[in-house]
Amino acid sequence: MTTPDVTVTVIVYNDAARLPRAVASLRAQTHENIEIVISDDHSTDDTPEVARRLAAEDSRVRYLRLPENSGGCSAPRNRAIDIARAPYLMFLDSDDELPPRAVESLLAAHREREVDFTMGAVRRVRVDNGRRTTWMPHLVRERRTLDGIAADPRLLFEHLSTSKMYARAFLDRHHLRFPEGIHYEDQLFSAQAYGLARAFTIIPDPVYTWYIEPYAAESSASISNQRHKISNVADRVHVQRLIDAFLVENGQAGLREDKDFKFLKHDFRMYAGDLPYRDDAWLAEFAEIMNPYLDTLAEGAYARLPRPERVVLELLREGDLDGVRLAARGLGHPVAPREVTAGADGTPYWGGSVPTTERARRELDLTDLELETRPFSTAFFRHEITDLRPGPGAALTLTVRTYDPGLRLPVGPQRAGLLLSPGRRRLTVPFRLDPVRPGVFEGRVQLDLTRARLPLQGFEGVRHPQVRLQQQGLAHSGLLLAPLAFPALTARVESGGAAHRITVEPEGRNPGRLQIRWQPVGVTARVLRPVVRKIDRPRVRNAFRLVTSALK
């Protein structure tokens, strides 16, 4: 048999439906001299039959079945490395794909200069909405060869093993294999590969297509989407400790601050947005696992974070679980704290009292948020629904409380508006915010969803109302936070001749905004939308413009 140039391993477990797509992406590679190893972690569905059929269809495909399930990705990858015949190796998950030129592009980079591995861009595709993005685009923007990870420690953020093509000699020289029996194996393997490589090449070409299912069922969710499990937290922290030990043993302790920053900004941040939805018992266990590790991280890593993230971390380390929930809502958005306290020197601190320790004063200092001086359009306010009552049809009465810790709004009642745009035309509902005490206002707004002007074909999607404030000719639009849990309200309405089922619910993730969902029903769904989709195509629109122009 001809020796293949590259072996690509497809790991699979109970994924008979998507395995053919993954293998088809390999059979379609522009570089054809490859070996395809399907490494099955002892599937119990139809995967073995599908894999054997794929192997029968193409002589480049080999099927390897593990004698028992390992419960992870490492063992099937390692067993495939053992039988791989090519000098270069790649890895693919059964629910993903390789772009057609992936193998060709990475192999060309190896042949251009002898390096330990090559890597490229990863295209992420949201399964729920089809949105496409590039994973860590700033790290793969240009073609470059680095003599070790110290040349750009930011690459520690790109910890995927699947975006790379490895020289087999490099893996064997360092006895580098995927750690078995643990989760987040990619992070440890990639950290070791970065730390051991004498040189590696980065290319901007897309080399991997990663399908993301953020709201997959628990039974089929990926490891990174099982953050609700305390064991998931423990696994992630355990791997970080192993990476730390490797850096010390490999004489690269100088990378620790960069690696710690990556952990805080990426790994911890993945849990932070979920913290408002966790109960006391879960949060207590989370803190018990996380805090001892947080205490080992470099102070410089904390200093590189945005202030709101530092606040959440400090409150967790202090054991203030209610404060954690409060501060974590709105991360990534300009959402203010409910309360700010000034120290003797005027320094503004998060919360209702001046911190008592040096570390807490450093971390909870809000000076850099410029609450009192930043431009009004980017100022920090906090809008919360304190009461939500359904009315007749699709009407709602909302009580909204606005916190203004920077005292940007003048004394007295404020004119406000509730903004909602389910179609191209925005619905604005004016209401008044009355002062409760300095920096706190409250008002009631009546929202009739039948007043939203929808297109003829209706609207299908989700919108989150915003609160609009105006001051001296300037406008500010901010998130409207809903109660974390309330029963979903559903009504069928007709607006502009289009029939819809409207659902009002809490967002259930991220900051937890008020969420309104439109779903066309009846004739709107069966007739109008399909007709408009056929008409509203580029060729039809262009032809219409051409005819209109000719008739002028």
Image: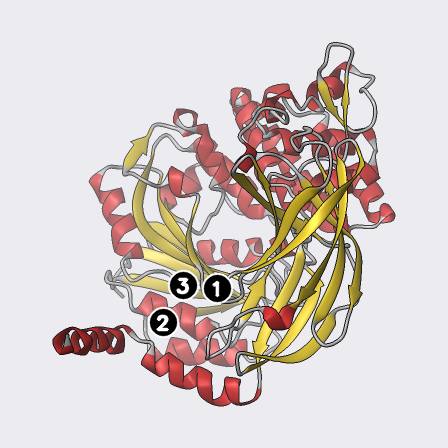
Q: Is residue 505 above or below residue 371?
A: below
User: Which secondary structure lies at badge 3?
Assistant: loop
Q: CA distance from mark 3 to mark 1?
A: 39 Å
Tell me the CA gap for discs 3 and 2.
Answer: 8 Å
In which quarter of the view is residue 402 placed? top right
Percent of width and height locating residue 222: 60, 59
**Which one is nearer the viewer's eye here, 173 or 123?**
123
- Expressed as whole percent of the image width and height from the top left, the position of residue 17 reads 51, 77
111 with respect to 550 (left or right): right
The numbered disc on residue 97 is 3
Which three-letter amino acid code belongs to the residue tagged 1? Arg
Say whether disc 3 or disc 1 marks the residue closer to the N-terminus: 3
> Which numbered dot is residue 425?
1
Mark 2 secondary-structure assignment = helix
Q: Nearest to the eye among marks 3 and 1: give it.
A: 1
Please report whichever mark, 2 or 1, sits nearer to the chain's N-terminal start: 2
Residue 385 at least partly seen = yes
Assign a secondary structure to mark 1. loop
- Residue type at mark 3? Glu
Q: Position of residue 430 (x, y in %)?
A: 64, 54
Q: Quadrant of the N terminus?
A: bottom left
Label 2, on which residue? 24
- The reply to whether the C-beta atoms of the residues labelled 2 and 1 are less than 8 Å apart is no
Q: Position of residue 437 (x, y in %)?
A: 81, 34
Q: Residue at x 82, y 27 (%)?
A: 352
> What is the three-letter code of the residue carrying label 2?
Ala
